[in-house]
Image: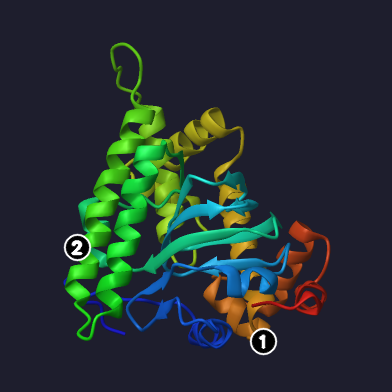
């Protein structure tokens, strides 16, 4: 698919979207090639499988309406309840760890290149606890998107601009939360660490060579290794391997794609190298992991 900067590009898996349409018995939600808008999660609540890794190819903005959930996003756990807002960037791997019976959300899923160019999505998740007034404002955005979509003539650009406006407001909120107390001092190692993790996240499938990231950041491989170890306690290859393992788990759990194809996408020389890597990381073969995950079922 060719990407046009002025057009939304929604890359959610077609089979998943069709299943969600079928379960949406009340017709509350909207799914198309350019956007997905959920204003009532109730039809899907009992279909979610706990512990099943899923890869998001699109960005998501989630506002919890009621109930609670615990979700792992690329190794980070978030406990959410009413009034909590979570932004999940594209290329994340999600694992739902728990969910209450009454859990319900507003959610919009999208991929709009111009948003990424504006810097409104920085490819790391954001969790914000909203005040009552902030929550009402965010809810109004979702309701307005719903009204536009349900009108006779869908104004796609209008929805796009609403998402951009909502993200500007959210961006202001987390800038306030991140604002340091006292004078700001340059932190070059932190800039390098953030640059490395961003490069790792924006790739659909990560490059498995530390020198690639060092070259992109205009530093030496050794300097990158020292900074990453100092800031995170992990090596650059540990970061790369963790990211690769997460993506492999999601791909194995959600499809019957051949191991050779998965190995190629994840930049292994062949399937046997991938199998050896995966077993070392997880403790079981890719096929055993796939069988165990698919036995649980999925949405």
Quadrant in which the C terminus is drawn: bottom right
The quarter of the displayed image where residue 162 is located:
bottom left
Which residue does the image show at 51% across and 85% down from the upper left?
A: 21
Disc 2 target residue: 161
Q: Which of marks 2 and 1 is nearer the N terminus?
A: 2
Task: Report x, y in % for residue 231.
Answer: 52, 30
Q: Nearer the viewer, residue 298 or 107?
A: 107
Residue 110 drawn above or below residue 259: above
Determine if residue 207 is in view.
no
Task: Report x, y in % for residue 276.
Answer: 75, 68
Disc 1 target residue: 256
Q: Is residue 23 left or right of residue 51?
A: left
Which residue does the image show at 32% across and 45% down from the upper left?
A: 170
Direction top: furthest residue? 182
Which residue does the image show at 32% across and 29% down from the upper left?
A: 176
Quadrant in which the N terminus is drawn: bottom left
Q: Nearer the viewer, residue 68 or 97?
A: 68
Residue 184 drawn above or below residue 145: above
Task: Report x, y in % for residue 281.
Answer: 74, 57
Determine if residue 297 is in view.
yes
Task: Report x, y in % for residue 208.
Answer: 53, 60
Which of labels 2 and 1 is toward the front?
Answer: 2
Crowd around label 2: few <14 · some 14–19 · many ≥20 (10 Å)? few
């Amino acid at each position: 698919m060719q990407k046009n900067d002025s057009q939304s590009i929604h890359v959610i898996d077609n089979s998943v979207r069709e299943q969600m349409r079928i379960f949406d018995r009340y017709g509350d939600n909207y799914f198309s090639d350019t956007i997905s808008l959920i204003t009532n999660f109730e039809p899907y609540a009992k279909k979610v499988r706990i512990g099943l890794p899923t890869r998001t190819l699109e960005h998501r903005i989630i506002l919890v309406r009621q109930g609670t959930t615990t979700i792992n996003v690329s190794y980070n756990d978030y406990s959410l309840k009413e009034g909590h807002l979570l932004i999940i960037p594209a290329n994340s791997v999600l694992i739902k760890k728990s969910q209450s019976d009454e859990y319900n959300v507003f959610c919009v899923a999208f991929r709009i290149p111009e948003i990424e160019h504006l810097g409104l999505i920085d490819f790391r998740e954001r969790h914000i606890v909203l005040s009552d007034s902030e929550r009402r404002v965010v809810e109004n955005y979702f309701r307005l998107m719903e009204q536009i979509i349900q009108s006779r003539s869908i104004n796609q650009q209008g929805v796009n601009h609403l998402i951009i406006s909502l993200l500007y407001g959210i961006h202001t909120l987390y800038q306030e939360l991140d604002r340091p107390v006292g004078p700001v001092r340059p932190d070059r190692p932190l800039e390098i660490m953030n640059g490395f993790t961003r490069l790792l996240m924006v790739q659909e499938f990560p490059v498995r060579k530390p020198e690639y990231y060092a070259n992109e950041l205009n530093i030496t491989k050794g300097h990158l290794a020292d900074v990453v170890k100092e800031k995170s306690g992990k090596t650059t290859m540990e970061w790369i391997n963790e990211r690769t393992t997460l993506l492999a788990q999601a791909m194995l759990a959600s499809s019957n794609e051949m191991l050779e194809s998965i190995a190629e996408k994840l930049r292994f020389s062949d399937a046997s190298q991938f199998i050896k890597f995966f077993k070392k990381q997880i403790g079981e073969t890719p096929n055993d992991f796939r069988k165990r995950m698919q036995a649980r079922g999925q949405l």
